[in-house]
Image (cartoon, rainbow, N blue to C red):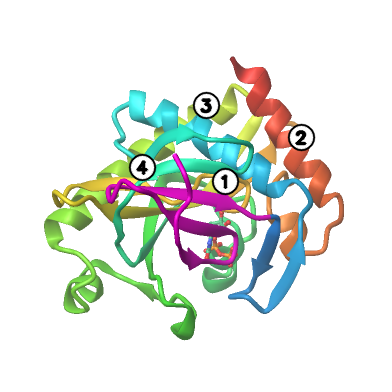
């Protein structure tokens, strides 16, 4: 499958048209941003890791009953995906307090929740991705009630799958962000990526951070952390 016109360039990926109007090619970059683009950098090898990790997890999720956009890995950095219209919601699931949750509610990072939380942000860089609730999303006509119910249910299913999967790799799944899309027939499927850019992943024994927080917080060892988490994934099966 050949890349045709570039349709979009985001912070971490480029998206290309293909000869099939239902399929796109996603190309993962090593570029990293944080704090709504204020902090910029490069994480060497990240594009390859995020592409391969996301594809592996998406394939497993499809088997587990979460339909998603993954079609076929084309090469180290490029993947064929189903074309969707992205629902402009960032869906965040948390098992443990960290990041903006800790800051907003004054809860120490590392506090384990009795049940996972689900929250939504309006995917809008100009507004800084503000937090919103279901009625706000409905008022803004970002999705229908039924779509939001589907999204929430899939997000919790993804959490259960990923939590168990990472546990088998000696990794704690702290929190993560998902994006969903509508296919041409109007059904909701999981899209975007699942990677150390979009998940908080801690070593189960040491609680060492093996994700993008190393970049966000200038902790050093960023490339090593991405390589280590990929090694854990590769050792899984
Ligand atoms: N996240 C993301 N993209 C965003 C915001 C958050 O992938 O634009 C992920 C982030 O990596 C973490 C989870 O969502 O795994 C929760 O992030 P949080 O709301 O704590 O925000 P942050 O502290 O990253 O600003």
Answer with the quarter of the image where residue 115 lies. Answer: top left
For residue 155, side relative to residue 35 (left or right): left
| Residue for point 26% across, 44% down | 153
Within 10 Å of disc 3 (Cα), the crowding (few <14, some 14-19, many 20+) is some
Pointer 1 with pointer 3, Cβ within 8 A: no
Q: Single out the mark in the foreground, 4 or 3.
A: 4
Of pointers 4 and 1, the one earlier in the residue sequence: 4
Query: Eyeballing the image, is 103 above or below 222?
Result: below
Q: Quadrant of the N terminus?
A: top left
Secondary structure of the residue carrying numbered label 4:
loop
Q: Which residues are magenta?
A: 1-29
Looking at the picture, tell me which residue is in the foreground, 121 or 191. Answer: 191
| Residue for point 33% across, 67% down | 88
Q: CA distance from mark 4 to mark 1?
A: 24 Å
| Residue for point 48% across, 78% down | 125
Give the image location of residue 45, x and y in percent: 75, 46
Check disc 1 and report the residue beneath it. 174
Q: CA distance from mark 2 to mark 3?
A: 16 Å
Q: Is residue 175 magenta?
A: no
Looking at the picture, tell me which residue is in the foreground, 128 or 79. Answer: 79
């Amino acid at each position: 499958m050949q890349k045709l016109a570039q349709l979009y360039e985001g912070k971490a990926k480029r998206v290309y048209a293909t000869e099939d109007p239902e399929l796109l090619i996603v190309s993962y970059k090593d570029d990293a941003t944080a704090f709504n683009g204020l902090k910029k950098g490069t994480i060497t090898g990240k594009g390859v890791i995020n592409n391969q990790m996301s594809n592996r997890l998406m394939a497993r999720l499809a088997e587990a009953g979460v339909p998603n956009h993954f079609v076929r890995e084309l090469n180290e950095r490029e993947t064929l995906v189903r074309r969707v219209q992205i629902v402009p919601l960032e869906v965040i699931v948390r098992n443990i307090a960290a990041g903006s949750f800790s800051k907003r509610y004054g809860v120490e990072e590392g506090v384990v929740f009795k049940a996972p939380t689900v929250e939504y942000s309006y995917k809008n860089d100009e507004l800084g991705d503000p937090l919103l609730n279901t009625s706000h999303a409905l008022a803004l006509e970002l999705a229908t009630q039924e779509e939001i119910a589907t999204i929430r249910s899939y997000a919790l299913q993804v959490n259960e799958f990923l939590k168990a999967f990472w546990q088998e790799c000696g990794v704690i799944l702290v929190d993560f962000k998902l994006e969903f899309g509508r296919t041409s027939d109007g059904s909701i499927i999981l899209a975007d990526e699942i990677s150390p850019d979009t998940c908080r992943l801690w070593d189960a024994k040491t609680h060492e951070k093996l994700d993008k927080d190393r970049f966000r917080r200038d902790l050093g060892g960023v490339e090593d952390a991405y390589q280590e988490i990929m090694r854990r994934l590769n050792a899984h099966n």
